[in-house]
Amino acid sequence: MRSPGYYGKPLSPGQLAALRLAASGYTSQQIAARLGSTEQGIHLRLKEAQVRLGARSRTHAVVIALRRALIRFDDLDLPDQRKAAA
């Protein structure tokens, strides 16, 4: 098993993609399907991101990434609120 990295190391493109989809509300299984990975691979990517960001949880990692503008609200795949209200 790979080491989860260390605090402060920049996030990889795969970690950023996984965080972006997690922020959009996707499960690890759904993220894996969208990124062509395994669920275990997604867990590892998110854990590595969590360590590198100094986050206490997956949700905390998403918040930190948003606050640092590593991922942006405009890039999230959120459901259309007009459709949800109908």
Image (cartoon, helix red, strand yellow):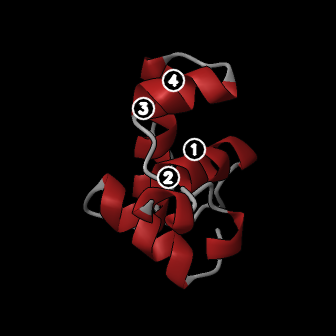
In front: mark 1 or mark 4?
1
Q: CA distance from mark 1 to mark 4?
A: 10 Å
| Mark 1 and mark 2 residues within 8 Å of each other at the beta carbon | yes
In front of the other: 1 or 81: 81
| Disc 1 from disc 2: Cα separation | 9 Å
Q: Furthest-front residue in view?
A: 86
Mark 3 or mark 1: name the one nearer the start of the chain. 1
Q: Please tell me the numbered disc located at residue 28.
A: 3
From where the camera sits, is residue 1 visible?
A: no
Q: Do the residues bearing badges 3 and 4 touch, measured as CB atoms within 8 Å?
A: no
Tag 3 near tag 2, CB within 8 Å:
no
The quadrant of the picture occupied by the N terminus is: top left
The residues tagged by marks 3 and 2 sit, at their Cα atoms, a distance apart of: 14 Å
N-terminal label among 1 and 2 = 1
Nearest to viewer (mark 1 / mark 2): 1
Q: Which of the two labelled residues, at mark 1 and mark 4, occupies the earlier sequence position?
A: 1
Please rate how many residues cluster around mark 2, counting C-alpha atoms within 10 Å: few if below 14, some from 14 to 19, many from 20.
many
> Percent position (x, y) of residue 67?
52, 83
Q: Is residue 4 visible?
A: yes
Disc 3 element: helix
Q: Residues within 10 Å of mark 1 (few under 14, many from 20)?
A: many
Task: Give percent across and percent down for residue 43.
Answer: 41, 32
What amino acid type is highlighted by mark number 2?
Ala
> Which label was assigned to residue 26?
none
- Name the residue located 58 percent from the left edge and 61 percent from the top edge: 80
Name which of mark 2 and mark 4 comes first in the sequence. Answer: 4
Q: In the rendered view of the protein, which quadrant contains the C terminus?
A: bottom left
Per the image, the residue denoted by label 2 is 49
Check disc 4 and report the residue beneath it: 41
Query: Which residue is painted at 74% across and 48% down in the image?
Result: 13
